[in-house]
Image (spheres, grey):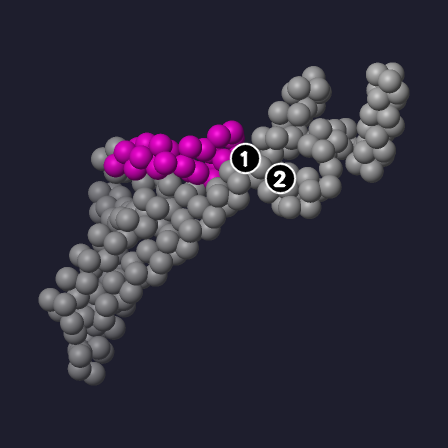
Amino acid sequence: MASAAQILANQANAKQSTGPRTTEGRAASATNRLRHGLTASSVTLFATKPEEREQYLELQATLREECLPSGTTEELIFEQYTYASFQSLRAQTFECEAQDRWLDNPDSQQLFLQMERIIKLGAMFERRAAKAFKQLQQLQLHRLAGVEVHAELADAKVFAPVSAAIPFADLRKTQLSKEEPLILGLAIATGLDPEFNRADQVRQNKANQSQEE
């Protein structure tokens, strides 16, 4: 650890430091925070590190083949998942490098703090990736659960928009166990009371049976 005299000397030197004075020096200083790019947006990161964009696109293509996002909503969540995963992988590399630097000089408080910050950033991106992946799972689960409703509406030639935000997987556990998919779809598309639709269908079925008899 640094002695008291060394600490005082460092503090005195810091007070005399005015930072970079030339245009080139200030430009270099401004990009110091982009050295690892873990706090930069995707636009800034790829503008300053074009080689990183190629790696990102490769990861994106691989994950797309596995996740198969569909529609704008899923695409937005998929992009969040991809970028967070990409940054998490990069953080692992920078963490190893920072750890090696600190192990070479374990008395350096600055190197320890740098390593600690990178570890925290990596953990943050891991949480973001996990959250986005879970959101994507839910969106796709609801989309697949709504296939039956959409198919019934198409067969009935009912062309009404149905929101992608509707939790069809949850509805399948409740309403779809009681209602016909077409009735539920009409209720969602038109805003009508499903109970009214069900009663109306019952009356129509009875009328059709009477005509057949």
Observer-nearest residue: 75 or 17?
75
Mark 1: amino acid: Leu
In the picture, measured across the screen, residue 31 lies left or right of residue 148, that is left
Query: Residue at coordinates 65% horizontally, 30% vertically from top-left?
Result: 149
Question: Along the polypeptide, which appears first: circle 2 or circle 1?
Answer: 1
The answer to whether residue 212 is visible is yes
The answer to whether residue 50 is visible is no
- Main SS, magenta region, reads helix
Q: Is residue 2 above or below residue 166?
A: below
For the C terminus, which image quadrant?
top right
Mark 2: amino acid: Phe
Considering every residue shown, the one lying at the far bottom of the view is: 4
Q: Quadrant of residue 152?
A: top right
Magenta stretch containing residue 66, yes or no? Answer: yes
Residue that numbered label 2 is attached to: 168
Query: Residue at coordinates 48% horizontally, 30% vertically from top-left?
Result: 70
Q: Which residues are magenta?
A: 55-79
For the N terminus, which image quadrant?
bottom left
Circle on res. 144: 1
